[in-house]
Amino acid sequence: MRNSYSEGVDELGLGTKGIVLNRDIKSWSINRKFMISCISSPSFLRESVKGSIKVINEIFECWKIMEREGMQVDFSEWTDAFAASVVTMAATGEEIPSVSNLFNSLNIKEKKPQTQGSWKDGAKFLEAIFTYNESMAFMMLFPTFIRRNFPGIKALNKKYLDNRDWINDKLEKMIVERRKEIERTPLNQPLDPTILTLLITTNTERDLEKISVSNFDRSLNDEEISSIVREVFTGGLDTTANSLGFIGFYIAQHRDVYLRMREEVLNVYGTIDNPDLTIESYGKLKYIEAVINESIRIFPTISLMSRAATEDVEFDGFKIKADTAVLSDFKALSNNPKYFKDPEEFNPDRFFNDKESIGKFTYIPFGNGVRMCPGRGWAMVQMKTFLIRLVCAFDVELVNEAADPKYFYATANRPVDIKLNIRTRQNHS
């Protein structure tokens, strides 16, 4: 189990639905398999790369304007906008103007128009998702009696439950509308392979990927679809954006690493002038993958991960009773000098030249076992796409090279104030 029983988690609708905190093993297994099938399908990943590039191009247009204005880039803000746009498009096909909203908030004379056909409630929905993530810890930590009766806490409890209802209502309406769109679309006309569409068409005549999950041969109902799509948002927004934010800090601090990333792109694609990115080529980017891993090693997106015993067990001299949650400290583990030499140093060669020396279970950024993060492959695709395009287009440096990365913890480690100086790349050096 992910966690011990919690009445508050049940109130949020997570105890028997979705994936992360679902304690109904049959429901969890089906949901997990469907999510993995959707986000690992070739058509979805190819569209995700296209969508990522579209958003990245929009971001870079903004950066070039900021460069002309002599402005610094707060990298973590832009990775937040990137993840919000990419995850929303991939999950629902809806576009939100997160990039133009961020750019226009900088009060530059030159304004950027919002995305055409953008999702009107998109920004509000994303804010509700962040609030939903916050509410998980609250609902698990505070007993039901306290949440419902203590002043202040009672009001916060109501806020979180109202937020839950608002999200569920939005997802329900989205599913109904998409079903109607699919029904109106001729059978010979292709559908966009968004997560929402893949789930709605599963085991129907419009099934895009012929997804097969054990003996599950019926279509998914709206509640099942809603729970999976909701977890795409709750699990996919913070994680990728935060990891990219920390990566941006370290590669800006280490010019030699940045240039090696650029050299690898040149070697794999034969050019750094708008290389043709394909899913099939990403497996060749071993050094860029090492850079990602080393950054996550120093600053795991999720520092703490819980597991709950399903039966009484003895471990290392401790007796752990059934339904007791045990926390693993990923940050302490991956920064332990027992397992990593000079752990405070950013050294991607640990995962490149010295990969074999990394001990089993000493680095588990996505967890391990059956509860391992199902979105790890998709997250790597998004990060590689952004980093390839970044090293091809710009040179970057930290505004304050001596600074440590700033962050705060709210379910995940969130980088803040990652200020970079950027300039358009002039040559291959």
Image (cartoon, grey):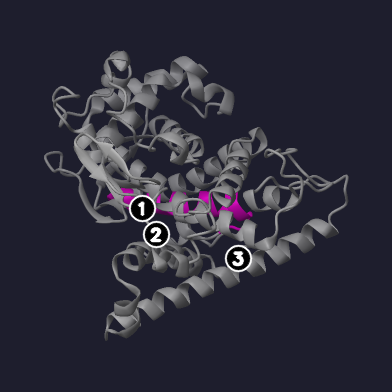
Q: Name the kind of residue labelled 2 in the image.
A: Tyr
Residue occupying the point 33% across, 48% down: 306
Mark 1: few/some/many CA within 10 Å (<14, 14-19, 20+): some
Residue occupying the point 25% across, 23% down: 256
Q: Which residues are magenta?
A: 72-95
- Please state which of the two labelled residues, at mark 2 or mark 3, is closer to the viewer: 2
Circle 1 is placed at which residue position? 323
Q: What distance separates the C-alpha of mark 1 from that of mark 3?
A: 32 Å
- 35 w.r.t. 150: above or below: above
Q: Classify residue 401 by image quadrant.
A: top left
Q: Secondary structure at mark 2?
A: loop
Q: What distance separates the C-alpha of mark 1 from that of mark 2?
A: 7 Å
Is the C terminus in the top left, top right, bottom left or bottom right quadrant?
top left
Residue 281, position in %: x, y?
Answer: 54, 22
Q: Name the kind of residue labelled 1 in the image.
A: Asp
Residue occupying the point 40% across, 80% down: 158
Circle 3 is placed at which residue position? 171
Q: What distance separates the C-alpha of mark 2 from that of mark 3?
A: 26 Å
Circle 2 is placed at which residue position? 5
